Amino acid sequence: MKGMAFAIREYMSYNKQNDNIRHTEDEHLIEGRNSVLEAFRAGKTVDKLYVQNGLKDGVISSILRDAKKHDTIVNFVAKEKLDQMSKTGKHQGVMAICSAYQYSDIEDIFKKAEEKGEQPFIFLLDEIEDPHNLGAIIRTANLCGAHGVIIPKRRAAGLTATVVKASAGAINYTPVAKVTNLAQTIEELKQRGMWFACADMGGEIMYDVDLKGPIGIVIGNEGSGVGRLVKEKCDYVVSIPMMGDIDSLNASVAAGVLAYEVLRQRLGR
């Protein structure tokens, strides 16, 4: 029997915020050259690096090398922007935003499945921006027996304190991996025996498909749904039956609906 993963198009609108320079209180803001350099060398997960335009000294070069090594997003900005972000007024032309929690590797997810003697069950989140949705999905992933969650590095919520709180402790048990390219990751997972299906209103009803094999549920962005490139990588199209007057579910709710259909079939009920 073929296992499948689901990509859900989420139609409810979400007010996107400009994340070009903003950070939240849920993230750790590190200021100053030595502090940023030490953050990299201590193994902290640096989500974003902001460097003042035109700076080219030795320390900055070292920081940029570390950022490249860890595939950190680098933004070159005007000094005035850094002044606006700074809490100390002593940013020295460089600032970093670190996640409130450490990320896992994809291998950790597969190892968890292997240790349980189960087929891999993974959530893949395509640009989920609301940290409450991300935390709720991590919570659902844990409760329904999924082995981990994969998120993209760009244009998506990271593991902030809000996410950790919304997960209700599930973050301590469910690995979350961050990847550069979700479509490429899907291709790599196919080589490991996983199958992918994109959920769409015109797809086959989820109750009529086989969900018991190695699968990953792909959840789309709150406003625009699953991106075209990610959708093209999926093998199947499925849908969630809707009987109400509106035709959409919140991203985390849709994730839960599909996740528990996977669990139901795995339990043979």
Image (cartoon, rainbow, N blue to C red):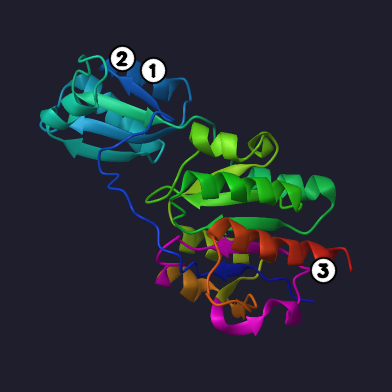
> What separation in Å lies between label 3 and label 2 (alpha carbons)?
53 Å
Q: Quadrant of residue 176?
A: top right
Residue 6 highlighted magenta (yes or no): no
- Crowding at label 1, few (<14), some or many (≥20) Cα neighbours within 10 Å? few
Visible residue check, residue 192: no
- Crowding at label 3, few (<14), some or many (≥20) Cα neighbours within 10 Å? some
The dot on residue 38 is: 1
Instruction: For the residues labelled 1 and 2, say whether their Cβ atoms are less than 8 Å apart.
Output: yes
Q: Which residues are magenta?
A: 200-228
Looking at the picture, how far across and down is residue 69, in whole percent? Answer: 39, 36
The dot on residue 156 is: none
> What separation in Å lies between label 1 and label 2 (alpha carbons)?
6 Å
Specify the amino acid type for callout 2. Asn
Q: Is residue 212 left or right of residue 85?
A: right
Q: Is residue 18 left or right of residue 1?
A: left
Which residue matches tag 2?
34
Pair 3/2: label in front: 3
| N-terminal label among 3 and 1 | 1
Q: Is residue 252 above or below residue 208?
A: above
Looking at the picture, how far across and down is residue 155, in whole percent? Answer: 37, 51
